Image (spheres, rainbow, N blue to C red):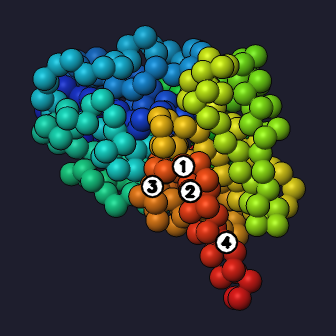
Amino acid sequence: MEKITDELTGVKTVAIAGHIRPDGDCIGSCMGMYLYLKENYPDIETDIYLEQPREGFSYISHLEDIKTACTEEKIYDLFITLDASTSDRIGVAQELFRKAKRRICIDHHVSNPGFADKDIICPQIGSASEVLYHLLEEEKITKPIAEAIYTGMAHDTGVFRYSCTTPDTMRIAAKLMEKGIDFSSIIDQSFCEKSYVQNQILGRCLMESIQVLHGKCIVGCLRRKDLEFYGVEPKDLDGIVEQLRVTRGAEVAVFLYELKTQEFKVSLRSKGSVDVNRVAVYFSGGGHVRAAGCTMQGSVYDVINNLTLQIEKQLKEKCSD
Ligand code: AMP
Ligand code: MN
Ligand code: MN
């Protein structure tokens, strides 16, 4: 794979952005890229656009540099997106992306059709952070950069458990460990640790979850009033769908929460027999075979019915194979 350095000749300004409601991979890959440019190319003016990460990621260096709003009308020489599967998921910096002189998309979503001047999309790689690692020069990766990239890799592989974890993933993780990172505390802080309300809302969602399709599908749902009652934000809901997924017998886990009246953010996870990317794409979303998402309109009953119909279709296809 070519290196990002090859793209920097004559470049004076760079913007970096991930996707809306950023997860660990998005935060890790964007911050990894940002810190790499900041530390190794101080003459390049680099800006990073992202939603503010939750408290658990606070060990990542220079989070305070993140721009959460887009006030400038700047035309960047280069715009790099990481972990974003479509250009409309870029968020606040979408307009800046459109206007930039050159655009590079670094991603790993199977649903990504490519939307930049240069697309580096590797669906066989478990995280955008791992794709990024291949584009960097090993000797230019300092400890803070390694911390960010390791975070992203750990999150999208479920701490190196999911099937997207490869021998290559482990070799790269080892290289990052050799940079002296505190990998144990990174995982504890960003992945395992929950605030009191995060645990409460997780418990609430699990308690009220329902099994459908003879237990092959489990559905958890949080309404606006629940989120308001506990005072939680979408970023506090990380990990709920993974907990639903580990339910014995469940092939698919569905987690939805209400964004606004009659609109739900849907997260889908699969143990492998159902391609949830296909389900998400059907509803104009996307993702990976075992982890995907979309936004759906309608009553909670409509949304669940429509989703389970698509899941059931695939389960039936499997049975008739
Ligand atoms: P989530 O359920 O939001 O954690 O997302 C699971 C995976 O699907 C992640 O890799 C997301 O980037 C991707 N994804 C979620 N929502 C969408 C969407 N609306 N369009 C495309 N990809 C999505
Ligand atoms: Mn992501
Ligand atoms: Mn990712």
The label on residue 248 is: none
Q: Which residue is mark 2?
A: 302
Q: Is mark 3 within 8 Å of ligand 1?
A: yes
Q: Is 172 left, or right, of 29 in this rendering?
A: right
Q: At label 1, which amino acid type do we have?
A: Ser
| Mark 4: amino acid | Glu
Q: Residue furthest top?
A: 64
Report crowding for label 3: few under 14, some 14 to 19, many 20 or more residues within 10 A (C-alpha). many
Looking at the rendered image, the disc whose residue lies closer to the viewer, 3 or 1, is 1
Q: Which mark is residue 299?
A: 1
Q: Residue at x 67, y 42 (%)?
A: 221
Q: How many marks?
A: 4
Asked if the residue at tag 2 contacts the one at tag 1, i.e. Cβ–Cβ closer than 8 Å, the answer is yes
Nearer to us in this view, 297 or 152: 297
Q: What secondary structure is marked by label 2?
A: helix
Q: Nearer the viewer, mark 1 or mark 4?
A: 1
Q: Which mark is residue 312?
A: 4
Residue 213, percent across and down?
Answer: 76, 66
**Amino acid at dot 2:** Asp
Determine the CA span between mark 1 and mark 4. Answer: 20 Å
Q: Nearer the viewer, mark 3 or mark 2?
A: 2
Q: Residue furthest right?
A: 248
Q: Position of residue 112 (x, y in %)?
A: 39, 57
If you read the primary sequence from the N terminus, does the residue marked by circle 3 or circle 2 appear first? 3
The residue at which mark 3 appears reads as 285
SS for dot 4? helix
**At x 34% / y 38%, what residue is drawn?**
90
Q: Residue at x 36, y 42 (%)?
A: 89
Choose between 225 and 27: the one closer to the eye: 225
Q: As drawn, which residue projects farthest toward the bottom? A: 320
Spatial CA span between label 2 and label 4 = 15 Å
Camera-side mark, 2 or 4: 2
